[in-house]
Each structure stands twice: as C-alpha cells, then as structure tokens.
Amino acid sequence: MEGQLREVVHTVNNLAQKFEDVARAVDKTSHIPAAVAENRAATVALEVRVTALEASENQRKGAVKLTEWAIRVVPFAALGAGFAAVAKVVGL
C-alpha cells in the first residue's frame, strides 16, 4: 500500500510539473491577443491610406490624360482656326 501511495504521489508531482509548464507557455503567449488587435488597427489605417493614395493617383492620371489630349489637339485646332481666319480675310 505504501509503495502504491508513493507512486501516486510521484504521478501527481509529475502532472503538477507538466501543468506548470503549460501555465508558463500560456503566460508567454498572453501578449498575442493585444498584438493581433494592434495589427488589425494598423491594417485598417493602411487601407485608408491606400484608398486616399489611389484617389490621388486617379486624379493625377486624369489630369495627365487631359494635358496629353490638349497637347495633341490644340496645335491642330490652332492651325485650323488660322486657316479659317486667313480664308475669311482673303475671302475664299
């Protein structure tokens, strides 16, 4: 009986040590939920910044395309208007 009691005590001590190891592991990971929440907040902030940058880039592209169109069209329109003015003055 005494031998069996020692074996039970030994088993309980081993289990207690394992539970202490588990408790230490849980303590080491206790910062993870806060880190996850922080990362989520940072992701949302980055999404807002990216959306603003995309809107700005779309505006810039629109302005560049308008400028390209004006550079292509205005010289020909000016030539056409000049020819029309000369034709009107000359009376053609």
Image: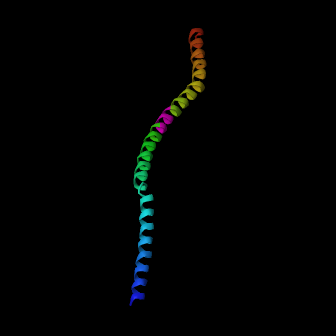
Q: Is residue 83 above or below residue 8?
A: above
**Point 60% across, 12% down: residue:** 86
The span picked out in magenta is 53-59
User: The C terminus lies in which quarter of the figure?
Assistant: top right
From the top left corner, tell me how far across and down residue 68 is, in percent.
Answer: 58, 28
Given residues 67 and 5, the one toward you in this image is: 5
Report the predominant secondary structure element of the magenta stretch.
helix
From the top left corner, tell me how far across and down residue 17 is, in percent.
Answer: 44, 71
Given residues 8 and 15, the one toward you in this image is: 8
Please, which residue is most extreme toward the bottom here?
1
**Point 41% across, 46% down: residue:** 41
From the top left corner, tell me how far across and down residue 16 is, in percent.
Answer: 41, 72
Q: How is the image coloured?
A: rainbow
From the top left corner, tell me how far across and down residue 90 is, in percent.
Answer: 60, 9
User: The N terminus lies in which quarter of the figure?
Assistant: bottom left
**Point 51% across, 31% down: residue:** 60
In the image, is 31 to the left or to the right of 72? left
Q: Is residue 80 visible?
A: yes
Q: Is residue 17 above or below residue 10?
A: above
Q: Is residue 92 visible?
A: no
Give yes or no for residue 57 being in the magenta stretch. yes
Q: Is residue 7 above or below residue 27?
A: below
Please, which residue is most extreme toward the front here?
2
**In the rendered image, which quarter is residue 33 located in?**
bottom left
**In the rendered image, which quarter is residue 18 located in?**
bottom left
Q: Is residue 80 above or below residue 28?
A: above
